[in-house]
Amino acid sequence: MLKQRVTTYIYLLFVFACAGCSNFPNRYDVMGKIGSWSVPENELTLAQRTVFFNHRSVEDVLARAQIIETKDPAFNHIKVILMRGTPYEMGFQNGRLNKDDIRKNVYHIIGIVKAYANSKGVHEDAMDEVYDLIEPFIPIEDKQEMRGLAHGAGIPLRVIHWLHAIPELSEYAGKKQFLRGKKYKTQEPEKGSLADPELETCSGVIAFNEATKNGELYHLRVLDWIRELGAQQYPVIHVYQPNEGHASVSFSYAGFTGCITGMNENHMAFGEMGYGNRNFETLEGIPFVFLFKKLLREADSIQEALQIVNDSQRTCSYVYQFSGTSQDSADHGVMLVSDYQRFESLSDAQEFCDEGDDRCYDGINDVLFAGHTTDKLRAFMVQHYGDHDLESFKELAKVAAMKGNVQNVIMKPETLEAWMVNASNTSKDEIGKACNQQWYYFNFGEMIGQ
């Protein structure tokens, strides 16, 4: 019974991800009051809830943080939030400094999800049960940060947990099989389902040494997801300077503490893409958004990042791309195909067999590439080989972007610079895609004093 309820919710999210939300009535406001919405605001006082402040005052904790706003519509009003302290304190700083946007974005997204669930008679407890599957594998640092954010923004922690379960659910495969009581997918995907390889999303390219104009390292991460959700209306760059662990930057959205794209102070960059629906996927492992946070905090090198992933209980099928500066040119970039059972690392000159289009591609020296249109990515990289620079990578984003292009980030791990761009609307038109917007320059090194 429990599995049936959990998987019913998973299936609803899958339908929602494929269909978009343009036809759903706007019956919710920024406080999330919709239909049978039953999650109350926090009733305990802040003093009763903030047990991780260690007797420090709220004013003292907030004094260590900083928020910068572009206030420029050309950049979609990007905010940069610099946080310092313990995971809980940084989450609280985030929640309090960006409270209004967090509440709007979180309640908007959860309101849509609840509308679907309510229309199908699925109780919200199913959302809790989904989070319960992944909770044992989430690092304690990330649990504390979510708790701090919930308290700072005045949002029930339960709702923040729901939000952070969505990315892994959107990648999870075998939903119909799961509904029949099977834990893992073991048969061929159905056309038009998330199992269909044609629905593979996101792209990534790393180039360095001979492939680029000045031998510089560039890392492009293209995020293709659900523009209709509207998360791109609340873009945030989260900068972390923790008491323990590496300083890092995460290119994200209001209310989301997990990482989908980021760099750390050790001059490493991280990106990912879903790899369709493969055998042996599970939700009982560490979601990639928290795996990336762990890499940002702990990884000193690409090899160490690979070891952390290998030692982790993994979930769904992904292609990870890690880049970084190193004395050994072989360590400038790596691509990793990973899921519940698989762990296959690929170097730049190695052949890549893309299961999405059932083709194999010869490797390119000093280039790593994969995405929804791997053939086009490879052709572009070969055509401009040796001349790649920032401008060519901006054009490359247009080659890679799908209709759901929500965000693109170009990272230079060596200098800790980055360029970020977000979709300008919630439709599926060409002009609103992230790749067609104005790029926002961000210097992570300057923010942390490097």
Image (cartoon, rainbow, N blue to C red):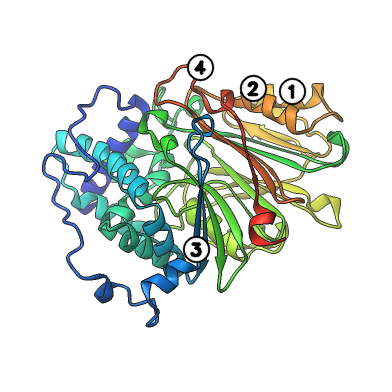
Q: Nearer the viewer, mark 1 or mark 3?
A: 3
Question: Callout 1, which amino acid?
Answer: Phe
Query: Dot 3 corresponds to which residue?
Result: 65
* Residue at 49% across, 63% down: 65
- Secondary structure at numbered mark 4: loop
The answer to whether the residue labelled 2 contacts the one labelled 1, judged by CB atoms less than 8 Å apart, is yes
With respect to residue 283, does 60 lie above or below?
below
In this orientation, does residue 314 appear?
no
* Residue at 40% across, 21% down: 427
Could you tell me how far apart the alpha carbons at marks 2 and 1 are, in whole angstroms?
A: 8 Å
* Residue at 55% across, 73% down: 243
Q: Quadrant of residue 425?
A: top left
The answer to whether 431 appears left or right of 100 in the picture is right
Question: How many circles with numbers are drawn on the protein?
Answer: 4
Q: Earlier in the sequence, mark 2 or mark 4?
A: 2
Query: Dot 4 corresponds to which residue?
Result: 430
Q: Of 250 and 443, which appears nearest the observer?
A: 443
Question: Callout 4, which amino acid?
Answer: Glu
Q: Nearer the viewer, mark 4 or mark 3?
A: 3
Query: Dot 1 corresponds to which residue?
Result: 380
With respect to residue 283, does 279 lie above or below?
above
Q: Quadrant of residue 257?
A: bottom left
Query: Dot 2 corresponds to which residue?
Result: 399
Q: Earlier in the sequence, mark 4 or mark 3?
A: 3
The answer to whether the residue labelled 3 contacts the one labelled 2, judged by CB atoms less than 8 Å apart, is no
Q: Earlier in the sequence, mark 2 or mark 1?
A: 1
Question: Callout 3, which amino acid?
Answer: Ala
